[in-house]
Amino acid sequence: MASKRILKELKDLQKDPPTSCSAGPVAEDMFHWQATIMGPPDSPYSGGVFLVTIHFPPDYPFKPPKVAFRTKVFHPNINSNGSICLDILKEQWSPALTISKVFAQSVLAPSAMIGLGYFSYTNTA
């Protein structure tokens, strides 16, 4: 089941890739992927290139993939070893979610920081 689902997600990614992201298997291991995320414009990550590893469990999609940044990044949802603390990769995971949907809710987007001690400041002086 997991292999078929992962292969389908890979084909979907190749057919309709998410903006500023690419991902695929490492060598021939369909359960281990590497992704590249470009820092979104108008964000503190603009111009950055971030490498991410994705490990799919044998019972995927019923359990979430483990997603971690290999590139060091300062972000309230990413710990010092690169692990992502995002509810959709933990207790809010659903088999209806896909890697593409995870990328669409990229933790590097400025909106991902709202509600976590993040505030927007506009100088009006």
Image (tube, rainbow, N blue to C red):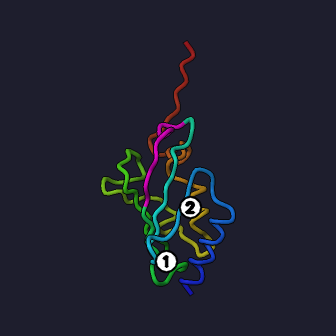
Q: Amino acid at mark 1?
A: Met
Q: Nearer the viewer, residue 3 or 65?
A: 3
Residue stretch in magenta: 43-52
Circles 1 and 2, Cβ within 8 Å, touching? The answer is: no
Q: Say whether disc 1 or disc 2 marks the residue closer to the N-terminus.
A: 1
In front: mark 1 or mark 2?
Answer: 1
Occupied quadrant, residue 111 = top right
Query: Any magenta on residue 73?
Result: no
Name the quarter where the N terminus is drawn: bottom right
CA gap, disc 1 and disc 2: 18 Å
Q: Residue at x 49, y 69 (%)?
A: 91
Q: Position of residue 61 (x, y in %)?
A: 55, 78
Q: Residue at x 42, y 64 (%)?
A: 53
Which residue is under mark 2?
102
Against 78, residue 58 (above or below) is below
Residue 30 numbered mark, or none: 1
Q: Position of residue 88 (x, y in %)?
A: 53, 64
Considering every residue shown, the one lying at the far right of the view is: 15
Asked whether, in this view, residue 82 is left or right of residue 49, the answer is: left
Q: Which mark is residue 76?
A: none
